Image: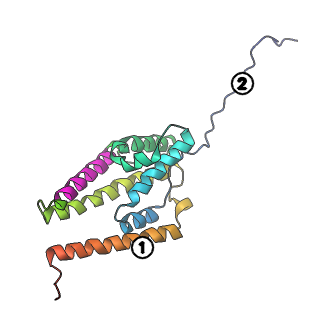
Amino acid sequence: MTENLYKVPESVLVENTNEVASFYVVSPRKFLILFIATFGLYTLYWFYEHWRQLKTRTKENIWPVPRAIFSIFFTHSLFRRIDKAAKVTGEAFSWSASGMATVYVLSEVVQNVCDRMSAKGFGSPYTDILGVLPIIFVGWSLFRAQKIANIACQDFQGSSNNRITLVNILWIVLGSVFWLLIIVGFYDLFIGIPEFS
């Protein structure tokens, strides 16, 4: 008997390479529909879901709701995590996590400043227009991040979350009302709604 009875047993640790990163997965088509239809309000839910999924997977002490509400302070962190997880997959992709996060943060800041100026009547109608334009850059940066998150989760087309649900339809309807109010507001601002006596 050549085996040492007093030797500490050795265990072989095998890293689970099949473990998939947990981020919010959504198809590009569904993302665009919900983002555009809700005039960007989908952003709140988008951030909430990413942080909630991360909290579930990592067991970190993360509060998803505040991180969604105050997203400008946590965007760089989220995008870095998405980038790091996507690189682990070995898939080829091109983007700058820091650059896209900065685009998002600056767009949100410009939008909020213009909205506040517009509400006080300062610089109207230009601040009204400038308050709406940053939504394009917000959507673009989040869309890019979502595509990378889908890569990190190895669901490239977001097929696991591609269907428009009843809840999504409800948000689309509410967003359509919001769009209608914006259109009426701009119509009144530039053309004017006639007063009837």
Farthest-out residue, left:
123
**Percent coordinates x, y for residue 49 in the rendering:** 48, 52
Residue at image x 40%, y 60%?
42
The 10 Å Cα crowd at callout 2, few under 14, some 14 to 19, many 20 or more, is few
Nearest to the eye among marks 2 and 1: give it: 1
Farthest-out residue, front:
197
**Percent coordinates x, y for residue 116 in the rendering:** 20, 56
Looking at the rendered structure, the secondary structure element under dot 1 is helix
Looking at the rendered structure, the secondary structure element under dot 2 is loop
> Is residue 194 highlighted in magenta?
no
The amino acid type of the residue labelled 1 equals Val
Residue 168 appears left or right of 130? right
Residue 56 seen in the figure: yes
Residue at image x 22%, y 58%?
115
Query: Is 81 placed above or below 171 here?
Result: above
Instruction: Identify the mark at residue 11; answer none if there is no mark.
Output: 2
**Residue designated by label 1:** 173
Q: Quadrant of the N terminus?
A: top right
Residue at image x 37%, y 45%?
75
Residue at image x 62%, y 43%?
18
Of callouts 2 and 1, which one flags the residue occurring earlier in the amino acid sequence? 2
Q: Quadrant of the C terminus?
A: bottom left
> Is residue 103 highlighted in magenta?
yes
Farthest-out residue, right:
1
First to last magenta residue range: 99-117
